[in-house]
Amino acid sequence: MAVADTYARKSLRASRRPTEYLLREEAGLLSPVMVYRLTAKGFDLKDVQAMLALSELYSTRKIMSRIVGKSVRTLQRQGSKESAHLNAQQSAVAFQFARVLERAIEVFGSLRLAEEWLGRPCKYLDGDIPLDVIDNPVGFQAVEDYLERIEHGVYQ
């Protein structure tokens, strides 16, 4: 029974897109202003953790610490003292990580291939690893632009 439950959870997680964990609905159904308002309000910490749990790469690379600017241990200690919501800046960074993971899955066709690409140096980014530049707005845009170029076959 436990194996069946684990399989069902993985299958359920696979059916939701990374941004849906944060926005609680499909991003394509929301206007950019609505997405902005949701990030300005702040995402629930548990939703961010659920989104990060989708990806082994995101889980192992301490992305939560990069999003919130604190170690996971500090977050756990403060969990009962502080609100369980991220602030607007943290939420925007979380959305960037979710959006890039989602786009990479769309472009490469699977989570495994998306994670491989996100975790290795990229010539287009002057040898930087895409995962390492996503938390900066300019880096996020560069990764998004390159994914679009790859999707259209123009990636030299």
Image (cartoon, grey):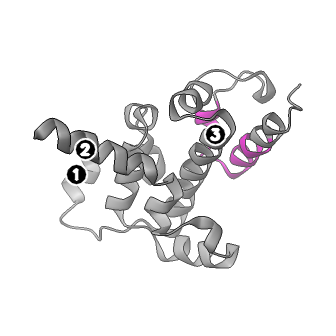
Instruction: Specify which label sits upstream in the sequence, 2 or 3.
Output: 2
Q: Which residues are magenta?
A: 130-145
Q: Which residue is mark 1?
A: 76
- Image location (x, y in percent) of residue 83: 29, 71
Q: Quadrant of residue 40?
A: bottom right
- Quote the CA–CA distance across marks 2 and 1: 5 Å
**Above or below, comparing residue 98 to residue 57 in the picture:** below
Residue 22 % position (x, y): 46, 63
Q: CA distance from mark 2 to mark 3?
A: 29 Å
Determine the main secondary structure of the stretch shown in magenta. Answer: helix
Mark 1: few, some, or many residues within 10 Å (few <14, many ≥20)?
A: few
Residue occupying the point 75% across, 48% down: 141
Q: Nearer the viewer, residue 63 or 14?
A: 14
Looking at the image, which is closer to me, 152 or 22?
Answer: 152
As helix, strand or loop, the secondary structure at mark 2 comes to helix
In depth, the one of 153 and 53 nearer the eye is 153
Q: Are marks 2 and 1 in contact (CB under 8 Å)?
A: yes
> Does the magenta run of residues contain 133?
yes
Q: In the image, residue 106 lies at what x, y percent?
A: 64, 43
- In the image, taking residue 156 as reference, residue 38 lies left or right, namely left
Q: Is residue 41 above or below residue 152?
A: below
